[in-house]
Amino acid sequence: MIWICFAIFLGACFGAGATGGLFPPGDWYARLQKPTWTPPNWLFPVAWTTLYICMAAAGARAAVSEGNGIAMALWSLQIALNGLWTPVFFGLRRMKLGLLVLSLLWLSVAAALVALWQVDWIAGLLFVPYLAWVTVAGALNLSVIRLNPGETGRAQEN
């Protein structure tokens, strides 16, 4: 049963991740000023693939556990917000709105981590790297906003 749950959660994760293919960073993002500590481009797909596997494993572990209602609701909320950030930031080019989505994502990941930990401590532990990565992503999003004050924040033809 846990493998079926894992496959379902992994499908949800890669569904959210597919927004990266639908709304790639492109030339607009490449032209933006970024902080010197910006991770290299190759790291993003590696990190997200690893994180999605951990997130799916956490979801599957919690799904087959007793008393999982809050954890499953928060898992669902965080994956919805995860899938929303890319179209907002890269698709609409709304960096400030993207930061709002990312802030809500951070809160939902932190809450999910706590709720998952209460159901299954390994599931909670599997969310720790995710929270760390979302923290870095939030700092990067904020830095890009600060380094590009003249950016209009709306989609334009390129």
Image (cartoon, grey):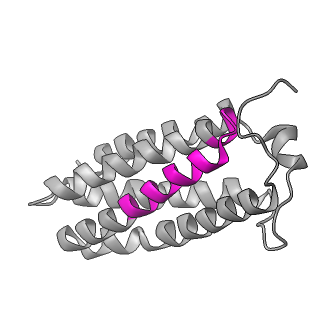
Start-end of magenta stretch: 89-109
Q: Is residue 20 above or below residue 156?
A: below
- Give percent across and percent down for residue 142: 66, 62
Front one among 72 and 150: 150
Assign the C terminus to one quadrant of the image.
Answer: top right
Q: Residue furthest top?
A: 157
* Residue ID at (37%, 45%): 9
Which image quarter: residue 65? bottom left
* Residue ID at (57%, 54%): 99
Q: Number of callouts in the render?
A: 0
Front one among 53 and 48: 48
Q: Residue furthest front?
A: 150
Which image quarter: residue 42? bottom right
Front one among 134 and 145: 145
Front one among 126 and 135: 135
Residue 110 appears left or right of 70: right
Question: Which secondary structure type mostly characterizes the magenta part of the structure?
Answer: helix
- Give percent across and percent down for residue 89: 65, 43
Residue 64 appears left or right of 44: left
* Residue ID at (64%, 68%): 139
Magenta-span inclusion, residue 14: no
Residue 125 appears left or right of 53: left
Q: Is residue 108 above or below residue 124?
A: above
- Give percent across and percent down for residue 131: 47, 69
* Residue ID at (55%, 45%): 85
Magenta-span inclusion, residue 92: yes
- Give percent across and percent down for residue 24: 73, 37
